[in-house]
Image: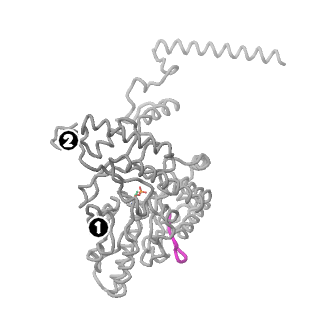
């Protein structure tokens, strides 16, 4: 047996060699060595304008995309985004193994749906909901906000119509410190935005700002927990007290929606005694981004109502085309279940204990970075003595030949750090700041390296002046690139 199989093996090998040689000869003749040694795309542009006529091998396609993406920013040095850039290998495995699972398909995947509801209940508990509540997963806080604000609009209309009053001029009150999604909501769904302007040194809003802007057509007031700009919170306690007062004295029941996109997973762990959630009576709904401090990869947000009755029944649709009658309250339909599962993984893996540990670790490192920047004598740190997200918002002090945008640009050019510089919203647009998110992946070693790199970038700019400013001016004159 043995010799025969060996000789057969040899025969097969020589056959295969012959075939390979013939193939190779053909390839040489076609000068198509790329099949053997490389990939067509290495010497040709990537398909981009028309639908490709022919395909390529799986390996080629993978390498084409990989090589393109290698030119993108390094997530480790991306201190601009609030969104999670790292999860544990076990969570990654769970995500990869469930990529095929369509979350909306509740009839076929009832456990995924149940896991979503477990997460909603856990969040309701974390946010101190008084009793039975409802909520859902969303693609992110933006979808959660659209849905939550739609519910505010419908509830307001019901209140107006019940009293036989007109319901055609809804308005929504919020500060200039909100994320752009709130202005989007107002435009998409035809609601008048009543925006409280900011001012130099005033980057959040309180009851005194809200009071003159509310009336019988106000569908709600938005309070931000952890603003995108400086990481602080609006005075939710004060706004709640004002609206409770308005409810008794003027018979106007104006709800608060808390935009906890970032802060919803920070405050319960860093500032558990600070009230901003359902402990305050007028807070009727809260959104939070699972993919920010919920520590899950992009694609997950949450909307939680105080009570079931805060979700308007009109907005819930019942369909049965997936085999079972199902209630849906979403802007999207099909979507992956992986991120819901990953969120649940984090909840059970970390618990309050783990989230608290991670939030404190980020806060410690943010404080270390703030100290380094302050000690350099070049920067002022904004509001680090207040309750704040684990980030550092800072700006130059004194007279300088360059500004914060120059530093952002120089830092990125020299070391690849992505630290955004931007002006604050009206009427604080004279204030330009840099903002560094201090996440789980930024170790103390890297905090010190970053501090050093910022100092180096400033030293370069001391010598060469404001390059970025010059480019900006050119753009303004219409001669820019
Ligand atoms: C990020 C953010 C949003 C938008 O959230 P997504 O999850 O990115 O859709 C809304 N509000 C605030 C305060 C945010 O920080």
In depth, the one of 105 and 174 nearer the eye is: 174
Name the element at disc 1. Answer: loop
Circle 1 crowding by C-alpha within 10 Å: few under 14, some 14–19, many from 20? few
Q: Is residue 302 above or below residue 14?
A: below
Quarter-of-image position of residue 457: top left
At a point 44% along the width and 74% down the height, the residue shown is 284
In depth, the one of 378 and 334 nearer the eye is: 378
Disc 1/disc 2 C-alpha distance (Å): 34 Å
- Direction from residue 45 to residue 106 in the image, left or right: right
Name the element at disc 2. Answer: helix
Which residue bears the numbered disc 1? 190
**Most prominent secondary structure in the magenta stretch?**
loop
Quarter, ligand 1: bottom left
* Residue 307 image position (x, y, % from top left): 49, 76
Circle 2 crowding by C-alpha within 10 Å: few under 14, some 14–19, many from 20? few
Q: Which residues are magenta?
A: 127-136
* Residue 106 image position (x, y, % from top left): 57, 61
Q: Is residue 58 above or below residue 238?
A: above
Q: Quadrant of the N terminus?
A: top right
Nearest to N terminus: mark 1 or mark 2: 1
Counting every numbered tag in the picture gives 2
Q: Residue furthest left?
A: 477
* Residue 104 image position (x, y, % from top left): 52, 59
Q: Quadrant of the C terminus?
A: top left
Q: Is residue 208 above or below residue 32?
A: below
At a point 45% along the width and 54% down the height, the residue shown is 367
Which residue bears the numbered disc 2? 475
Residue 434 visible in this rendered orientation of the protein: yes
* Residue 74 image position (x, y, % from top left): 44, 39
Residue 331 visible in this rendered orientation of the protein: no
Can residue 267 be found in the magenta stretch? no
């Amino acid at each position: 047996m043995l010799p025969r199989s060996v000789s057969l093996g040899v025969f097969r090998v020589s056959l295969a060699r012959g075939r390979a040689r013939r193939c190779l000869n053909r390839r040489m003749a076609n000068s198509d060595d790329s099949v053997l040694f490389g990939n067509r795309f290495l010497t040709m542009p990537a398909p981009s304008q028309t639908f490709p006529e022919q395909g390529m091998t799986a390996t080629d396609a993978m390498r084409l995309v990989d090589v393109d993406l290698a030119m993108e920013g390094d997530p480790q040095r991306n201190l601009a985004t609030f969104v999670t850039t790292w999860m544990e290998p076990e969570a990654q495995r769970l995500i990869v193994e469930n990529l095929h699972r369509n979350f909306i398909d509740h009839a076929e995947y009832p456990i995924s749906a149940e896991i979503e509801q477990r997460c909603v209940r856990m969040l309701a508990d974390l946010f101190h909901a008084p009793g039975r509540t409802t909520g859902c997963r969303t693609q992110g806080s933006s979808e959660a906000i659209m849905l939550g604000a739609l519910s505010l609009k419908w509830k307001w209309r019901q209140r107006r119509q019940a009293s036989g009053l007109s319901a055609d001029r809804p308005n929504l009150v919020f500060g200039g410190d909100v994320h752009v999604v709130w202005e989007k909501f107002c435009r998409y769904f035809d609601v008048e935005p009543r925006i409280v302007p900011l001012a130099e040194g005033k980057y959040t809003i309180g009851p005194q700002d809200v009071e003159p802007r509310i009336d019988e057509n106000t569908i709600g007031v938005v309070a931000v927990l952890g603003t995108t700009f400086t990481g602080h919170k609006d005075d939710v306690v004060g706004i709640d007290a004002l609206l409770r007062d308005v409810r008794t004295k003027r018979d106007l029941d104006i709800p608060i929606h808390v935009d906890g996109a970032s802060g919803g997973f920070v405050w319960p762990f860093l500032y558990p005694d600070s009230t901003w959630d359902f402990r305050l009576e007028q807070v009727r709904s809260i959104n939070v981004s699972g993919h920010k401090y919920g520590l899950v990869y992009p694609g997950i947000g949450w909307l939680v109502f105080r009570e079931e009755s805060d979700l308007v029944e009109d907005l819930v649709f019942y369909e049965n085309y997936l085999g079972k009658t199902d209630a849906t309250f979403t802007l999207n339909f099909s979507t992956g279940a992986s991120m819901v599962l990953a969120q649940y993984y984090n909840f059970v893996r970390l618990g309050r204990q783990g989230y608290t540990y991670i939030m404190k670790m980020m806060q410690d490192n943010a404080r270390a970075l703030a100290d380094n920047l302050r000690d350099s004598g070049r920067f002022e740190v904004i509001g680090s003595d207040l309750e704040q997200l684990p980030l550092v918002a800072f700006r130059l002090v004194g007279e300088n030949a360059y500004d914060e945008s120059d530093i952002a640009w120089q830092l990125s050019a020299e070391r690849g750090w992505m630290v955004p510089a931007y002006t604050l919203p009206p009427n604080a647009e004279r204030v330009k700041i840099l903002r560094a998110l201090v996440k789980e992946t930024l170790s103390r070693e890297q905090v010190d390296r970053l501090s050093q790199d910022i100092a180096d970038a400033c030293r370069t700019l001391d010598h060469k002046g404001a390059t970025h400013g010059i480019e900006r001016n050119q753009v303004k004159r219409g001669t820019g690139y």
